[in-house]
Image: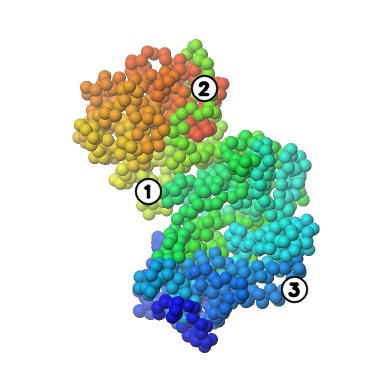
Amino acid sequence: MPLSAPPGGHTAAPAPASDLASDLAPDFWAAGCYLRERVTPSSAPPAPTAAAAAPAAARLAGWRALAPFRGPDERFIAGLRPVGVTAPVLHWLLGEDPTALAARLPGRPVWARRVRSARPTPAPPGTEPLPGLLRVAEPLVRQAQDRLRTALRRLGPFPAELAGLCEALSASVPVDRLAMVLKPTMILEINVARVEGRLASGRTGEERYRLFVDSLTSPRVQHRLWTEYPVLARCVAELLDSWVASRTRFARHLRDDLGELRDALLSGARPGGVAAVRFGHGDVHRRGSSVCRVDFHGAPSVFYKPRSLAVDEQFACVLYRFNEDSPYALRTPNTLTRADHGWAECVTARPCATTRDVAGFYWRTGALLALVHALGGTDFHHENIIAAGEHPVLVDLEALLHPRAPERAGDGGGKGEPEEPALVALRESVRATALLPTKVVLDRAAAGAPAADYSGLNGARDQPSVVPVPVEKNPGTDEVHIVWEHVTTAGGENRPRLPDGTPADPADHTPDVLAGFRFGYDWISARRAELLAPGGLVAGFAGTPVRFLPRASFVYAKVLAESTHPDFLRDALERERSTARLCAGRYAGAAGEAVVRAEMDAVLRGDIPLFEALPGARKLLLDDGRAVPGFFPEPALAAVRRRIEAMGPEDREFQERIIAGSFVGSVDMSLLEERPATVPGPARPRTRSADTEELIAAATAIGDRVRHLAIARDGRVGWVAPQPVAHGVWDLAPLGQDLYSGLSGIGLFLARLGRISGHRRFTQPALDVADEVVRRVHAHAAAHAPGGWGSGGDTDIGAFGGWMGPLYFLAHLDRLLGGTPHLAAVREPVLSAAERALSGIKAFDVVAGSAGCALALLSLIDAGGDPDGRAAALARATARHLVTGAVPGAAGTALTWEHHQIDSTRPLTGLAHGTAGIVTALARLHPLAPDEGCAEAVAGGLAYETEVYDAEAGNWPDFRAEAVSPFRSLWCHGAAGIAMSRLDLIGRPGTAGREEELAAQAMAALRFDDTGPHRLMGRGSDSMCHGDLGNLELVLLAERSGRSEPGGLMRLLGQKLDTAAERGWVCGSPTRSETPGLLTGLSGVGHQLLRFACPDQVPSVLLLHPPVSAAPYGATAGRPG
C-alpha cells in the first residue's frame, strides 16, 4: 500500500472503529513473541514442513554464525543454554508459520491488545504532536497518556505543594527512547518510498519528508507497519506501558515522602508547586525507571533515584567520622532513603574561589580515593563526581563495595591457571575506582582521536564517545539515513574551575592528590580496629544494596541500539538473536546462564540491565527480583575487611606509584627526545672517570630496584608501568612479553646482571621471567592462531615485539645460563607466527618489521636453536621480503623502504624505523642468503641515506611528519643510531669502497658541543631508546674500533654516575616517571652500565648483536644473595 499522504496532504479524519483494525492482520502479534513465549508446557512447536526446512536451516545458520555459538556442535549446544532453548527446538521455531504459532499459543498478549485498541484521537489542548518520524506512534502515545492520567487520578488528590505534577508527568513523553526504537525503521521506510517514487509529488527533499510524515498519521499506514514490523509495535507498546508505570510509581513516592523530604532536603520550605520534572538522568533500568530531577517553585531542587540510598547514608557516616580527624572536611549530598527508592540533594557545580581551593579540591579527591579504594568502590567516572568549589562530591555511590565476579566460562589459560599478577594487582588497586585518569583506546580513524579519558579526575569535554552511536544524516529530508559514528561528548562537571572559570588540569596537582591519599590511607590504617569492629562503620554496609556490573553499560547500550535495526523487528526471534551476543563472555555454570538470560530480557524490554548484591552475602539479585544464591566467590564485605587489614607501608607505596603513573597521558612524542623543563641539567662534572666496579655496583642497585617493583604471586611474575597504548598516548598497564618495554627486556637485564655480578638474587628472577614469557607466548599464540578468539593475528614481528622479542631474550638466556628449556619451548609458536605474518605484512623496519625479525632469527641460529634449519629458511625469506620490498629512489642506485605506520614526507632514515636498520639486517643476512641480493640492497640503502645526508649538520633529516625539528641524534631517530649502524656495517657485504665514508659519517655524530643539533648528552633521560646511555653506545663503538681516543666514555659515565647519585636515574617515559623496561626504563640503564663495564661479555642490544657467553666479573662467581 502506498505511503502517500491523504488528498491535500492533510491528516485523514479518524476512521470508524470498525475499520481501524481491518488492516491489522489478526495474527500479526505472533511474530512478535520471543523464544520462551513460543515454547509452552502444553504446546511444543512442530518440526518444519518441507517448504520451511530450507529457510529454517538458513536462519539457524545465522544463529550459529554468532561469536558465542561459532564452532563445533558442543559449543553451540552449550552456548544456547542461557537462551533457554535447545538446538532442535530452536530449529523448529525458526521454521514455524506465524499463523500456526498464533493458533497454538494461549492468547493475545497485552501489548498486542494495546496496539489493536489504539485510536487516533485529537491531541489535548496545549499538547504538541510527536516530532517527525515518531508520528506513527501518536495513537499509542495518546492512549498511554490517558492511562497515566487515570492512574494519577486514582492516587487521590495531590497537595498544593505538588501542583502541576500531573501535567508535568503527562507531558514527559519518552521521546528519546521512542526515537531510538522507531527511527531506524521509519528511516528505512522513507528511503524505500523515495526509491519507489511514492513521494514524487514533493518538489524538494524537505517536502517529500513532510509527505511521508503526514502519511504516518493514517491508521491504515500505521497498521501496515505494525503488521510488517510486529516487534516494533511490541517495543513501542511495552515502552509506553513502562512509562506509565514508572511515572505513576514516582508520583506515589513523591506524595508519600513529601513531609520528610521538606525536613531532610528542602530546609523546611513548602514548595509552591512543581516547576519541572526531568527524567532520563543516567540509564534506564527495571522497566523504564531512571533518575529524575524535580524542580520546585520556591524550594531547592532534588534528585529522585529509583533505588535504596542506604549505601549513600552509610558512606556519609564514614565521612562524618573521617572529618573529625581531617584538616579538610569531605562533603557528601544529603539524602533521604526508602527501601526501593531515595531522594538526594541537587549538588551544583561552582568554581573555586582561590587557587588554594583548587589544591584543596585535589587533596580531598586523594582522601576520597583512599576511602573509596578501601571500600572496594568502582565506576566513579566523570559523571559521578561534581566539583562544587573546593569540594569533590560523589553523587552516585551504588558501586561501592563492588563484589568480586566469579570466573567466566572459557577464560583464557588452562583450568586453574593463575591470573597474570600485574593484571590482578592493577585491577585491585586504586585504579579500579575509575577516579584516576585512565585511557580508553579508540579507533583513531573512526573516532578522530587515539584515546579518551572518562575518569572521575579527568573526563574532559569534547572527547569522542567510547563507542559509535547511531547519528542521523540529512535529517528532515527524504534522504535521511543513519550512520554509526563517535560523537563529541559534553563532559561532566567533575573538574574544578579556577576563579576565572578555566578548568584545572589534574596533572598539575598530582602532589596534592598524593598528599590527600596518604592522609586518608594512614587514617584508615590507624583506625583499622575501630572501622572493622563488630557493629562498626564497615559492618554497617552489610545489608546496603549495591550495584554489580557484569559489563560496562555502554556494551548493553550498543546491543540495545543495534537490536532496533529493522531486520530484527519483523520477527522477535531475529531480535533475540541480536541480543544473544551477550552469551559471549558469560560467567561459568548455571548461575552465569541466569545472568545472561536476565541481561537479554532487560535489553529486550528496552532497559540497561541492573544487578545488585548485599555486601554481607554471596547472592546476586537479578533485576526482576530473583536471587542467584552463592553467585559470588565471597561477600564483598569479606574482601573489604581483608583489604583494610592488609593496608601498610609497602601497599601504600605501591598504590602511590599507581596514582603517580596514572597521570601520564597524551604525549607529544618529540618531547620524549628533549630535556623536559622538570629535569635539571647535568651535575657539575667530576674530574675522575668511572671504573668497572662502580658501573657494576650501579647496575646492581638498579637490579634491586627492578626486583622491588616486581609483582609476584602464585608462581607468576609481572610489572606495572606507564607505556604507550596508542599513538602519542601513554597509560599505566601491565607489561607485556615484548623486548622493548616488557618482560623480555627486563629478563635479559636480570640474567646478564646475575651472570656478571654472580648474585643468584638476579639469576632466579630472570628464570622466573623466562617462565612467564614462555607462558605468555603460548597464550598469545593460542589467541592469534587461525580460528582463535583473536584471529586476524599479531603481525608485529619486529625484534622488540611480542613474538621476536622473547626469542631474542631466550636465545641470550640459553647462552648465558646454559641449556635452559625456554628457548625450545617458544621456538615453534614464534616461528609459526612469523611465517604467517611475513607473507602479508608491509613492515620492513627493525622495531616492527622483517628487518627486526631477521636479526632475532640470527640470534636464535647463533645460540644453536635451529637444528632443523627452519629458522634459517625463515631468515632467507625475510631477506627476500626486504629485497623485494625496496623501492627505487629518486636518482641513481638508491633504494628506499616505505613505513606504513609512521607518516613521513620521505622514506625514513634511522636505525629503529628507517633505512639504516634495514641495511644493517641485510648485511648480516648476506652470509646466510648470498643469492637473495642482500649486498646490492645494502648498497642501495646506503646510497639513499648518503643522498639525504646533511654534511654541514653531520646528520640525516628526520622525515617524520610530526617531527618538530629537522634533525635528531638518538638511537631511534637521527645521527646516533645511524652512526652506530655505520660502524657496525664497516667490512660487511655491500660496503666495499665506502669504509672511509661510513667512518666519517659516524665520527661526525660524535660531536657533542653544547649548541649542536645532535648532541649525544643532555637528552633529558638516561634511557637506551632516546636518552644519554643509548647514545653513549656510539662512544663505546668508536673507542673499541680505534676511531676515538679511549677514556672519554668513562669520563662521561663518571658524570652520569654523579648526576644519578644526586637525582636518580631518569627514565625515558613521559614525565620521566619510573618504569622497569629495557628501551625506556631502568633495565635499559642497568644493561648499558653492564655493557660499558664488560663490553666483551655484554652484546649490544641496540644493534641486536647475537649472544655471547659471559663469565662472572672478577672472583664473584657463586656469590650468594
Residue under circle 1? Answer: 793
Q: Which mark is residue 513?
A: none
Q: Do we see residue 159 in this rendering?
A: yes
Give the image quarter of residue 165.
bottom right
Residue under circle 3? Answer: 157
Nearer-the-camera pick, 584 or 351: 351
Q: CA distance from mark 3 to mark 1?
A: 67 Å
- How far from the left and from the top, in percent, is residue 561? 49, 62
Q: Secondary structure at mark 3?
A: loop
For image coordinates 51% across by 72% down, the residue present is: 135
Q: Amino acid at mark 1?
A: Gly
Q: Amino acid at mark 2?
A: Gly
387 with respect to 327 (left or right): left
Mark before the other along the chain sequence, 2 or 3: 3
Tell me, what colour scheme is on the image?
Answer: rainbow
Q: Secondary structure at mark 1?
A: loop
- How far from the left and from the top, in percent, is residue 321? 76, 45
Q: Nearer the viewer, mark 3 or mark 1?
A: 3
Mark before the other along the chain sequence, 3 or 1: 3
Mark before the other along the chain sequence, 1 or 2: 2
Residue under circle 2? Answer: 681
Nearer-the-camera pick, 941 or 865: 941
Q: CA distance from mark 1 to mark 2?
A: 45 Å
846 with respect to 231 (left or right): left
Which quarter shows the N terminus? bottom left
- How far from the left and from the top, in percent, is residue 233? 51, 74
Which quarter shows the C terminus? top right
For image coordinates 24% across by 22% down, the residue present is: 994
Q: Do we see residue 566 in this rendering?
A: no
Give the image quarter of residue 90.
bottom left
Q: Secondary structure at mark 2?
A: loop
